Image (cartoon, rainbow, N blue to C red):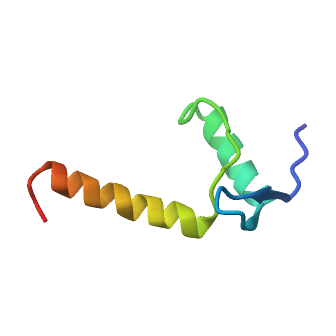
């Protein structure tokens, strides 16, 4: 059986954040259900992930001619 532990990860911005055992368990369940192929540890903290999502949404709007 897999043993999951909280893991401290350094974000690309330098902030140290925790990838929780609960998040790892959830993602492993998605693999077992065939919904994702594999679990890859995050490389961005929650704040950087949110910022990146917002930037990508802005790029999508511009690509469709919407500002």
- Residue at horizontal 75%, vertical 66%? 17
Residue 27: x %, y % from top left: 66, 46
6 shown above or below 4? below
The location of residue 25, given as percent across then percent down, is 75, 50
Q: What residue is drawn where x is 55% and y is 64%?
A: 48
Which of the 4 quarters of the picture holds residue 14? bottom right
Q: Residue furthest left?
A: 65
Estimate the x, y position of residue 32 in percent, counting from the top left.
Answer: 66, 33
Q: Position of residue 54 (x, y in %)?
A: 37, 64
**Is residue 27 placed above or below 66 in the rendered structure?**
above
Residue 13 against residue 24 in the figure, above or below? below
Callout count: 0
Q: Nearer the viewer, residue 29 or 67?
A: 67
Q: Is residue 60 left or right of residue 14?
A: left
Seen from the viewer's position, the closer of residues 25 and 53 is 53
Name the quadrant of the C terminus. bottom left
Instruction: Give the residue at x 27% y 54%.
Output: 59
Which quarter of the figure has residue 22? bottom right
Q: Name the residue at 90% across, 37% down.
A: 1
């Amino acid at each position: 059986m897999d043993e999951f532990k909280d893991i401290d990860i350094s974000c690309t911005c330098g902030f140290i954040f925790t990838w929780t055992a609960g998040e790892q368990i959830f993602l492993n369940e998605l693999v077992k259900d065939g919904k994702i192929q594999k679990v890859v540890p995050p490389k961005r903290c929650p704040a950087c992930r949110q910022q990146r999502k917002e930037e990508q949404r802005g790029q999508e709007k511009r690509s469709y001619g919407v500002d």
